Amino acid sequence: MSKAAFVTKLTFVSSSRPEAQEARDKLAARYGDAGLAEAQVIVALGGDGFMLETVHALMHSGKPLYGMNRGSVGFLMNEFSEDDLLGRINAAERAVIHPLRMNAVDVDGQSHEALAFNEVSLLRTTRQAAKLRISVDGKVRLSEMICDGALISTPAGSTAYNLSAHGPIIPLDAKILALTPISAFRPRRWRGALLSHTARLRLEVLEGAKRPVSAVADNFEVPNVVEVYIAEDRDVSLCMLFDAGRSLEERVLAEQFSA
């Protein structure tokens, strides 16, 4: 969205929460709803989970997304206000993010492809710990890890599940991916790795029949995987809008200094 393209046409989407639907109705009545085809910006009302759903549903529309928090966490959302919405959007700062592309092969040899704007995670699905082998750019870097799982995070997703798993917060423009173990038992002191955004990863599930594992790309899950390939897809991009002075870069930086 260039500075010259003054935004006047919006469309509104909301989560199923009553407060989000009420906000959508009020905003549409006040500012008009141009519909997806005519709108210059998509306004999403809900929480971070709904924003992620909206990203996947509408990323091919080519429209920037501006979120307002009518959910719980709202890290990816702007503060909610009915006033001066067009002014806020036209003054907003943009963040362009790229997803990971996951190709997961299951026990039947079927391949499943999905995009992840936050992270790709491999998770054990029974009481048995998972056993994983990790290769980066064709070279085995960890021959065996016994764990609850592992995840690969984008910078945009580094403050989500990755942070909860004690992974590092990554500046948005760092061109780095985080590889983070989830409750690793062996090697006990391995805390993960920072990889170039050009890295191509292969995660193999060892003893999968005894220790089944699911692969999850954001909200798309593939059960009983045997190997998973992950790489950033620079051909896919998404523009998100944040209020002036509250850019996504600023939020990621501020998160590193929060208590």
Image: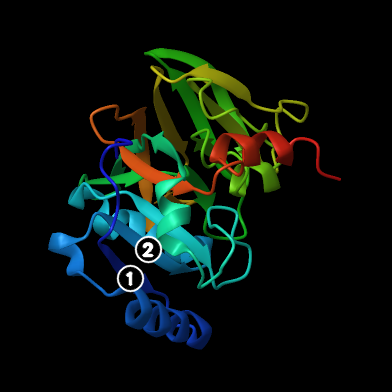
**Residue drawn at (36%, 37%), measured in percent from left and top?**
99
Q: How far apart are the alpha carbons under marks 2 and 1?
A: 5 Å
Dot 2 corresponds to which residue? 43
Residue at 48% across, 79% down: 20
Looking at this view, name the residue that lies furthest to the right. Answer: 259
Checking the image for residue 12, the label placed there is 1
The mark total stands at 2
In the image, taking residue 49 as reference, residue 104 lies left or right, namely left
**How far across and down, in percent of the image, does residue 191 sit?**
71, 28
**What type is the residue that disc 1 sits on?**
Phe
Position in image of residue 176 (x %, y %): 51, 21
Q: Residue placed at 45% from the left, 63% from the top? A: 85
Mark 2, other Cα within 10 Å: few <14 / some 14–19 / many ≥20: many
Q: Residue at (30%, 52%) from the top-left corner?
A: 7
Q: Position of residue 98 (x, y in %)?
A: 36, 34
Tell me the kind of residue under disc 2: Val
- Using the rendered view, name the quadrant where residue 184 is placed: top right
**Which numbered dot is residue 94?**
none
Q: Are marks 2 and 1 in contact (CB under 8 Å)?
A: yes
Element on which disc 2 rests: strand
The answer to which of 13 and 50 lies nearer the viewer is 13
